[in-house]
Image (tube, grey):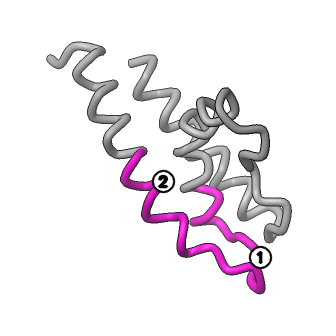
Amino acid sequence: MYSKTYRFIWLLAVLLIVNVLNAPVLNPLVPAGIMDGFCHGLTLFLNLGGLAVKDNVALYAADNTGFGYVLGYFLGVRIVEGVVNA
C-alpha cells in the first residue's frame, strides 16, 4: 500500500514530535513511569543518532518505577521496530 520510505518518513515525523513533547514532562522528583518508558522507547533510535554528536545523551531513565517503565520502553522499541520492518 505505502512504500517503506513513506512509512519511515511519517514514523520519523511522529518520533520527533513525541521526543519534543516528552522533554518538559520529566520531573526529577517523580520516577519515570510506563508512559515515560513508552516515549523513551519510541525515541530510542533518535537518541542513538544524538550519540554521534554528543557524549551525554540519555537512552534510559535511571530513576524509574521498575517493571512499568521497562514494559513501556520495550513496547515503544517494538512498535518502532515493527513499523520500520513492515
Mark 1 surroundings within 10 Å by alpha-carbon count, few (fewer than 14), some (14 through 19), many (20 or more): some
What residue is pinned by disc 2?
A: 19
**Pointers 2 and 1 in contact (C-beta within 8 Å):** no
What residue is pinned by disc 1?
A: 31
Asked if the magenta segment contains residue 32, the reply would be yes
Residue at point 22% right, 13% down? Answer: 3
Residue 7 or 75: which is nearer the viewer? 7
User: Magenta residues, as a range?
Assistant: 16-38
Mark 2 surroundings within 10 Å by alpha-carbon count, few (fewer than 14), some (14 through 19), many (20 or more): some
Residue 82 or 8: which is nearer the viewer? 8
Tag in front: 2 or 1: 2
Q: Quadrant of the C terminus?
A: top left
Residue 79 drawn at (x, y percent):
49, 38
Q: Amino acid at mark 2?
A: Asn
Mark carried by residue 22: none
Q: Secondary structure at mark 2?
A: helix
Magenta segment's dominant SS is helix
Residue at point 44% right, 58% down? Answer: 20
- Single out the residue that lies furthest toward the bottom: 29
Residue at point 61% right, 46% down? Answer: 41
Q: Is residue 78 above or below residue 76?
A: above
- Single out the residue that lies furthest toward the left: 1
Residue at point 57% right, 66% down? Answer: 35
Q: Is residue 68 above or below residue 70?
A: below
Q: Secondary structure at mark 1?
A: loop
- Residue 74 figure quarter: top right
Q: Amino acid at mark 1?
A: Pro
